[in-house]
Every structure is written in C-alpha cells, then in structure tokens.
Image (tube, helix red, strand yellow):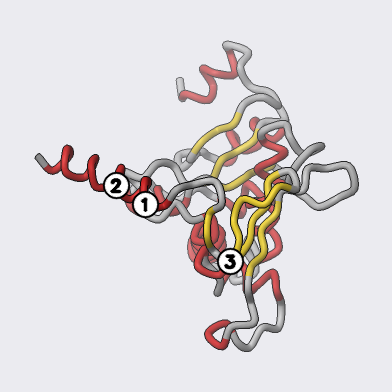
Amino acid sequence: MRPLERLHRLGLLGPQLIAVHAVHLDTGEIDLLAREGCHLAHCPTSNLKLGSGIPPMSAVQARGLNFGLGTDGAASNNRLDLFHEMRHAALLAKGASRNAEALDAHAALHAATLGGARALGLDCTIGSLLPGKAADLCAVRLDEWLMQPCFDPASHLVYAAGREQVTHAWIAGKPVMQNGIPLQVNISELLDLATLWHTRLMS
C-alpha cells in the first residue's frame, strides 16, 4: 500500500500531522489529508534543488488543505529565505497548473504566516497581528528605488522583496534586529565559527 494509506490505517492522520514536501500525493490522498484535518509543509526551493518533484498545490488549495512554507535544511536550500519560498511556491503552482491565478500573492503570504502557525497549532498565538497575540513581526522596506513602483504590498513581498529588505524584526514585541543588524548575535564570533567549520569540513 502507499505510505499515506499505511499511516491512515495506523491512526496517525489528524490535526497533529504535518506532511512535509508531499510531492507524490494523488488527489485521493489530498482529499484524505483534508478530511482528517492534517496540514502540509511546502518546501519548494528544496524540492527544486533536489529534483524531488512539485506538489499539486492547486489541488491542495481547492480541497482546503491547510499548508505552510518551509525551507528544509541548508544542504538542499542555500539561502533559507522564506521570501524565496513564497515566490517559488507561487510561481511553481502557476507553472504546474498552467493557471496564472493559482496560489496568488495573498495565498502565498498566508502560507508563510498564519498557515504555518495553524499547522503548528500556534495560530491562536502567532501568525497574524491581532490584540492578545505575540508581536512577532518584521519590517520590510519597500520604498527603495530598486523596489519601485509598488502597487500591491502583498504582491511586492512575494514577487520582488527578499530578506535583504528586512530592516527590523521583533519576537514577542522584543527587538531582535535593528537596521539590518541582529541584536542578539555577535557577528564577529559567528563569522569565526563559520570559518572554523568551513576549514574542518574542507579538510
């Protein structure tokens, strides 16, 4: 039997299951995941680099299966940049379905925020900016000359911006980045550590 059917018979499908990558799902399996309230972690850049395949995100959306975005690890995704994941997810969905309206910018942004929070069971705390939720947010500069013109901020975040445009970040309201500089990391020590491991791995 197929892996998902095996998991189903073992009673493992439900709201606590996050199916990662999911590049080999058929339509019946997408229906099953949606019925059981499961979630999906879509990692488009990793899937592209490894040649793993493309999940049928149009069908995932059509069946109401919740999904968030992931990067996987550095071995299959050099940038680990969620902005790239949004862009790749949106473009892959359009290319695979031959439908320019598939996974639009707002849906991609939702997947990167509230969709991921919902998959983790944390949507009551994070994923959107509402009173009573943790103030986890970042400021993205869209007024640079390279980012002009900007007609739709959501579309710009998905198709034009990258981590280079993030100027500030907060976790639970506490600043962790200011003017592009991490506040809780010693960059010199971090670079020394990276050099150390690079030398070890190369030798």
What amino acid type should be assigned to the residue bearing mark 2?
Asp
Q: Position of residue 30 (x, y in %)?
A: 61, 38
Mark 1 neighbour density, 10 Å: few (under 14) some (14–19) many (20 or more): few
Q: How far apart are marks 3 and 1 (CA)?
A: 17 Å
What amino acid type should be assigned to the residue bearing mark 3?
Asn
Q: How far apart are marks 2 and 3 (CA)?
A: 23 Å
Is residue 93 in sight in this rendering?
A: no
Q: What element carries label 3?
A: loop
Is residue 27 in sight in this rendering?
A: yes
Which one is in front, 44 or 170?
A: 170
**Residue at image coords 66%, 36%:** 31
* Residue that sits furthest to the right in the current view: 131
Relative to 103, is 135 above or below? above
Q: In which quarter of the image is the N terminus?
A: top left
Left or right: residue 93 versus residue 2 is right
- Figure quadrant of residue 139: bottom right
Q: Do the residues under discs 1 and 2 have CB atoms within 8 angstroms?
A: yes
Left or right: residue 139 versus residue 188 is right
Q: Where is residue 182 in the image (x, y as percent from the top left)?
A: 53, 54
Left or right: residue 55 versus residue 130 is left
Mark 3 neighbour density, 10 Å: few (under 14) some (14–19) many (20 or more): few
Which one is in front, 200 or 54?
A: 200
Q: Which of marks 3 and 1 is nearer the N terminus?
A: 3
**Residue at image coords 48%, 40%:** 21
What amino acid type should be assigned to the residue bearing mark 1?
Ser
Q: What element carries label 1?
A: helix
Q: Name the residue under label 1.
A: 188
Q: Mark 3 points at which residue?
A: 179
Q: Position of residue 36 (x, y in %)?
A: 71, 27
Q: Is mark 2 on a helix, strand or loop?
A: helix
State the mark number for residue 192.
2
Which one is in front, 180 or 136?
A: 180
